[in-house]
Image (tube, rainbow, N blue to C red):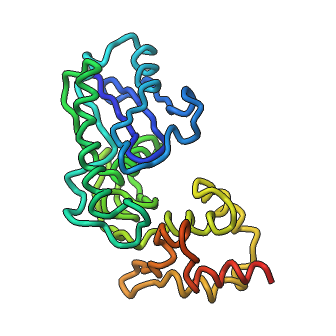
Amino acid sequence: MYVMGINSVFHESAACLLKDGVILVAAEEERFNRIKHGKKPKEDNPDELPLNAIHYCLESVGITLSEVEYVGYSFDPKKMPQGPYHDLFGEEWGGSAGLEKFCRKIYQVADRLRAMGFKGELKWIDHHTAHAASAFYASPFREAAILVVDGIGETNSTSFFSGKNNKLKFLQEVSYPASLGFLWESFSHLLGFSIYDAAKVMGLAAYGDPRRYSSYFDKIVKIAPNGKFEMDNEVLRFGSIIYDPPSANCQGLVSSNTK
C-alpha cells in the first residue's frame, strides 16, 4: 500500500512516499522551484501543493498518484477555532477574514489532488502530531518523550507526547498565543534578520551573557505554577514587529544590546 505525506500548509513544502510503512523517497519543494522554504506562508495558499516534489516522488518509484491509497496532509482544519485566533495578528492573519480565506483554500486541497488523478482517501493530520511522528518514527527508540515546539499548529504552539512501540500518545499542550516559535521570529526580525532566521539567532544566543538580558526576558516569558509558560502577547503580535513600534519589554532587550 502506497501512502504519501504532504506538507504545504505554511512553509517548508515537501512530499514523502511510503510503501507498507517504509519510506521510499522524500523531497523538499525548494530543491526544484529554487524558492527558499518552498513558498511564503499566506492565508490564501495552503492549497498550493509541492507539485515538483510530488512528481519527483512518484516518478522515482515509477507509479502515478492514482496508485496511492492515502494522502496525509500535515494540518487538520477541523481543529481550527471557529472564531478569530486573537487580535495579535497584523493585516488579515488570524482575523475573521483571514481565517475564512484560509479555510476555504485548505479545503481545496482535495480538489487539487483529484485533478491530479488521486482516487484514494485524504486524511487531515494534526500538525503537531505530524511533527512528533516525523521525529519518533525516524528515531532508533522504542520508547521516548517527545516535545514539539513551533510557531503554531491548529491552535497549539507547544505539545508533549509519549512514544512507545510505534504508538504516539498526546499528553498536553501550550496554546497560542503563548508561542516560543513566534517569540524567536520576533527577536530575529527586530535584530535585522528575516523571521526565517530564528535558528541563527537561537544558535548565536549561546555566545551571549544570559545575565545581561534575563531581567528583560523574565518579563516576556513567565513560568506558570503548572509548569507551562505564559507570554507578553504584545511581543508576539505580528503587527507590532512589522508595522508598529515593539512593546516596551521587547524594546528593552534590543536597547540593552546597544549599550
* Depicted 157 relative to depicted 111: above or below: below
Q: Residue at x 38, y 42 (%)?
A: 45
Q: Is there any visible trace of residue 135 in the rendered image?
A: no
Q: Residue at x 29, y 23 (%)?
A: 2
* Depicted 107 relative to depicted 93: above or below: above
Residue 49 place in picture, x, y as percent: 38, 33
Residue 77 place in picture, x, y as percent: 24, 50
Q: Is residue 10 left or right of residue 215?
A: left
Q: Residue at x 25, y 58 (%)?
A: 80
Quadrant where the image shows the N terminus: top left
Q: Residue at x 44, y 78 (%)?
A: 233
Q: Is there any visible trace of residue 187 in the rendered image?
A: yes
Quarter holding residue 93: bottom left
Outermost residue, right direction? 259
* Depicted 126 relative to depicted 28: above or below: below
Q: Is residue 20 left or right of residue 193?
A: left
Nearest the eye: 51 or 140: 51
Q: How many marks?
A: 0
Quarter holding residue 124: top left
Quadrant where the image shows the C terminus: bottom right
Residue 81 place in picture, x, y as percent: 23, 63
Residue 135 place in picture, x, y as percent: 44, 47
